[in-house]
């Protein structure tokens, strides 16, 4: 075989080997599809798919996903800008009918001169929609000059996710400012002026997704049949698991790490992870779930969040979370709840403390364990504190003199009696 023949043969062998190898670009597209399809399926909102034949419009998003009366919608400003902030362009649509017919996927895709659908890479789109809720502003007559009779806005931010693999996915983030009358003084656990925010994913199929979804279903079914603690997962299965918020993965990590940070007394750090877990769990406690011990984990999450807020002196926020688990019957939960209420000056505190003491007196709550005894002593110390707080000096003295006889309360009683003497004299 001559040199030229050997060269030709090597080229043919290289081409054959190359044809057997998966195309790296195809892999990128497929992996992007798997990750985004998993996110689309696992989101809490039930969002329908979009296609060229049945496109999702802004009317669907406003009415079905945000529960907004379409008659309250006015004009819309569209702001398109590249990721680096240059080449900003804006457009105003005045007709409400055109606003409602707007197709969000057109913000991230376009058709080129060859008729191919392509993505607008590195570009974001912002929609600012005029919004005047009839349930809040009753008179829609434009001659009404009342200061509360003003337009609000719905702000929607759209960006594309990953590569397009015959389907394009987009993240839609929504913010609606509140119509609240009070200023930003926070009387409760949450400011009434906090805006409404939500986020969801849309999927738009450029070509029929039947084959892709069938293949995805197979991967997902295989994943759910495995023991995730010991299984050797395929790359696609790993992608799905990383892309969704199943309780066994992300929530469990946030819960466990949050508790670890509480033990290290890093309360502000712990709240970040514990509240992430809470946001997921609060829906699982009312929706049927197969995740074991979901209620126990929810209760522990609320307790740890309340404990953190107590330690940080934010008692009103602590009460919000601890109140949800106060009826569970766990003494440690009740103690933390009472501490938050008393420290916050809640006027219900004394009656609740007396209620629990009454249960011990009438025998419905026996002192039959070390924990019950500890709770009994705790209640009397807290009652003495409340007597002092409300300047009920005689009742405080009488109770503290009795508590001096208890080893668990002796030092507390002596200290509080000295405090009373300092305040009002012997």
Image: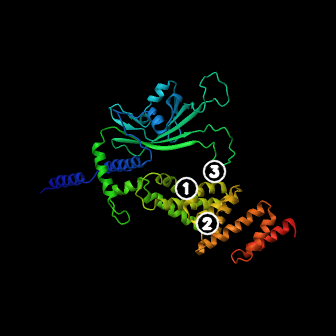
Q: How far is the residue under mark 3 from the one under mark 2?
A: 23 Å
Q: Give the crowd class for mark 3: few <14, some 14-19, many >=20 residues within 10 Å.
A: some
Determine whether the residue tagged by mark 2 lies in a helix, strand or loop: loop
Where in the figure is residue 302, as x and y percent of width and height? 56, 58
Callouts 2 and 1 close, C-beta under 8 Å: no
Callouts 3 and 2 close, C-beta under 8 Å: no
For the C terminus, the image quarter is bottom right
Disc on the earlier residue, 3 or 2: 3
Q: Nearer the viewer, residue 284 or 49?
A: 284
Q: Residue at x 67, y 25 (%)?
A: 145
- The residue labelled by disc 2 is 265
Where in the figure is residue 130, as x and y percent of width and height? 55, 30
Disc on the earlier residue, 2 or 1: 2
In the image, residue 426 above or below residue 211: below
Determine whether the residue tagged by mark 1 lies in a helix, strand or loop: helix
Q: Nearer the viewer, residue 250 or 425?
A: 425
Determine whether the residue tagged by mark 3 lies in a helix, strand or loop: loop
């Amino acid at each position: 075989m001559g040199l030229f023949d050997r060269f030709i043969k090597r080229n043919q062998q290289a081409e054959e080997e190359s044809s057997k190898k998966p195309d790296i670009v195809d892999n990128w597209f497929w992996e992007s599809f798997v990750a985004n399809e998993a996110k689309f399926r696992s989101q809490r909102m039930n969002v329908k798919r979009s296609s060229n034949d049945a496109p999702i419009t802004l009317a669907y998003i406003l009415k079905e996903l945000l529960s907004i009366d379409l008659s309250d919608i006015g004009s819309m400003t569209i702001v398109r800008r590249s990721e680096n902030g240059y080449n900003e362009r804006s457009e105003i649509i005045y007709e409400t009918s055109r606003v409602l017919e707007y197709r969000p996927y057109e913000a991230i895709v376009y058709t080129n001169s060859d008729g191919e659908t392509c993505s607008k890479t590195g570009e974001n789109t912002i929609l600012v929609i005029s919004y005047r809720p009839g349930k809040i502003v009753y008179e829609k007559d434009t001659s009404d000059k009342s200061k509360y009779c003003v337009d609000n806005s719905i702000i929607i931010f759209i960006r594309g996710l990953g590569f397009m693999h015959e389907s394009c996915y987009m993240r839609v983030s929504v913010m609606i400012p509140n119509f609240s009358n009070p200023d930003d003084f926070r009387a409760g656990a949450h400011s009434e002026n906090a805006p409404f925010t939500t986020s969801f994913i849309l999927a738009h199929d450029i070509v029929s997704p039947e084959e892709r979804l069938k293949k995805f279903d197979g991967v997902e079914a295989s994943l759910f049949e495995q023991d995730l603690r010991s299984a050797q997962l395929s790359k696609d299965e790993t992608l799905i698991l990383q892309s969704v918020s199943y309780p066994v993965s992300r929530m469990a990590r946030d819960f466990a790490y949050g508790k670890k940070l509480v033990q290290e007394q890093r309360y502000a750090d712990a709240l970040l992870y514990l509240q992430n877990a809470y946001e997921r769990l609060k829906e699982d406690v009312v929706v049927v779930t197969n995740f074991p011990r979901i209620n126990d984990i929810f209760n522990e999450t609320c307790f740890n969040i309340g404990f953190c807020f107590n330690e940080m002196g934010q008692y009103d926020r602590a009460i919000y979370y601890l109140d949800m688990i106060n009826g569970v019957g766990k003494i440690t939960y009740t103690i933390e709840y009472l501490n938050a209420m008393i420290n916050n000056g809640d006027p219900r505190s004394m009656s609740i403390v007396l209620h629990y003491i009454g249960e011990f007196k009438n025998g419905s709550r026996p002192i039959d364990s070390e924990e019950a005894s500890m709770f009994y002593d705790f209640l009397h110390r807290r009652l003495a504190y409340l007597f002092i707080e409300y300047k009920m000096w005689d009742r405080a003295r009488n109770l503290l003199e009795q508590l001096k006889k208890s080893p668990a309360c002796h030092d507390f009683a002596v200290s509080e009696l000295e405090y009373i003497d300092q305040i009002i004299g012997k």
